[in-house]
Image (cartoon, rainbow, N blue to C red):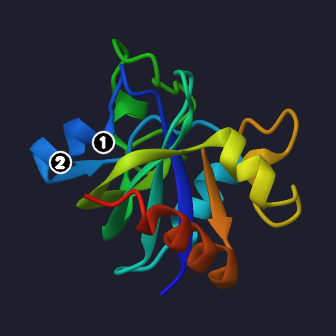
Amino acid sequence: MAYWLMKSEPDVYGIADLERDRTELWDGVRNYQARNFLTSMALGDRAFFYHSNTKPPGVVGLMEIVAINVVDPTQFDPSSQYYDPKSSLDSPRWHTVTVGYLETFAQVVTLDQLKETFIPDELWVVRRGNRLSVMPIDDAIAEKLLQMAQTSRV
């Protein structure tokens, strides 16, 4: 089992939405490196749900990868902000995963806490200027993150 961190803005789709929906297609990723990480995921992998563009930003919960190598349908929808006219049904450019809700932490593990605990080479989300929405997490770092969340779990 591998660990990941996946970002979403809570006013677009937050942990409460995933808790309500139970599973959701993680659509709209349009960065090639993030897409490659999505295609590297395996069933049963775990992902930390990170709320970005909010105060305070941080890790808010945990989810599981429940479907892999899913074609992102938004690439074919001309009315979607994620439409890609260079993509075709015969040769889709964007693949993603479906995530399943596991838990919400009682308190956010804030970006400030992450910066105090990890260096940029350990946890990419603390790198200055990092804009990736999907990133791998080393097992040892994931365990530390889970420990930090332990006191914050519901």
Given the current orientation, which residue lies at the most extreme bottom position? Answer: 1
Image coordinates of residue 46 in percent, x first then y, are 43, 72
Depicted 151 relative to depicted 29: above or below: below
| Label 1 residue SS | helix
Give the distance between the C-alpha atoms of the residues marked 1 and 2, in whole angstroms. 6 Å
Given the current orientation, which residue lies at the most extreme top position? Answer: 79
Residue carrying label 2 = 19
Badge number at residue 24:
none
| Label 2 residue SS | helix
Quadrant in which residue 83 is drawn: top left
Is label 1 in contact with label 2 (beta carbons under 8 Å)?
A: yes
**The one of 127 and 81 positioned closer to us in this rendering:** 127
Residue carrying label 1 = 15
- 17 relative to 5 in the view: left or right: left
**The one of 39 and 2 positioned closer to us in this rendering:** 2
Depicted 102 relative to depicted 129: above or below: below
For the residue carrying disc 2, how many other residues have a C-alpha within 10 Å: few (<14), some (14-19), or many (20+)? some
Residue 53 showing in the rendered view: yes
- 80 relative to 3 in the view: left or right: left
The residue under the point 59% across, 74% down is: 142
Image coordinates of residue 39 in percent, x first then y, are 53, 66
- 3 relative to 136 in the view: left or right: left
Residue kind at label 1, given as amino acid type: Ile
Total numbered badges shown on the rendered structure:
2
Residue kind at label 2, given as amino acid type: Glu
Image coordinates of residue 93 in percent, x first then y, are 55, 47
Quadrant in which residue 98 is drawn: bottom left
The residue under the point 33% across, 12% down is: 79
Image coordinates of residue 63 in percent, x first then y, are 34, 62
**The one of 140 and 133 positioned closer to us in this rendering:** 140
